[in-house]
Amino acid sequence: MSVRVFACARDEVEALKKLLEYDPALDKGLSVEALRKLQEDKYGSVIFARKEFSLREGRSFGIDDDNFYLYLKADDDFLKAAEERFSHEFKTVKHADPGVEQKLTAFISEEENKANQGFGAIFGG
């Protein structure tokens, strides 16, 4: 699995949240025809709700700007398709600068380690 971090301007973050949380397989309102069309769509298989991701405000991990950052962990093919989908559907969602990517990845890794240590303490590990 690879990790990629994307920057998103504040004015597009709500649309990005909707995209990240949506799974068409769980949408009871979709007709069979709509599901078929979705399967034929170039980006129909780029379903973020089935991947590991975290959307954070830059200030929450020490980046002093007004952007939000999406941490996305998936295989390389999915990440490539995700980047294409973002460039097709959003004006501001772009691959983050390497320094920001490294900082957010380290921040999330540290959070995961702390959570794992906490679970170990709770369950006697």
Image (cartoon, rainbow, N blue to C red):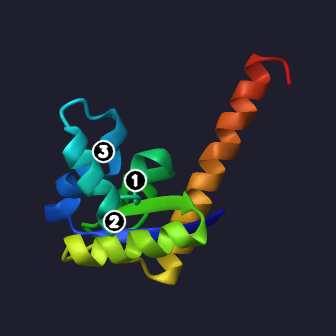
Residue 64 visible somewhere in the drawing: no
Q: Return the mark for residue 47.
A: 1
For numbered disc 3, what is the local secondary structure? loop
Determine the CA span between mark 1 and mark 2.
Answer: 8 Å
Q: Quadrant of the N terminus?
A: bottom right
Q: Give the mark count.
A: 3
Q: Which residue is mark 3?
A: 22
Q: Quadrant of the C terminus?
A: top right
Q: Residue at x 24, y 67 (%)?
A: 66
Task: Report whether 1 appears left or right of 90.
Answer: right
**For residue 32, which quarter of the picture?**
top left
Q: Residue at x 40, y 68 (%)?
A: 82
Determine the CA span between mark 2 and mark 3.
Answer: 13 Å
Disc 3 residue type (three-letter): Tyr
- Give the label, 2 or 3, closer to the camera: 2
Q: Return the mark for residue 95.
A: none
The percent coordinates of residue 118 (x first, y second) are: 70, 29
Q: Residue at x 21, y 72 (%)?
A: 90
For numbered disc 1, what is the local secondary structure? loop
Q: Which residue is mark 2?
A: 43
Q: Residue at x 30, y 71 (%)?
A: 86
**For residue 85, which quarter of the picture?**
bottom left
- Report the front residue among 31 and 81: 31
For numbered disc 2, what is the local secondary structure? loop
* Tag 1–tag 2 contact (CB < 8 Å): no
Name the residue furthest right. 125
Determine the CA span between mark 3 and mark 1.
Answer: 7 Å
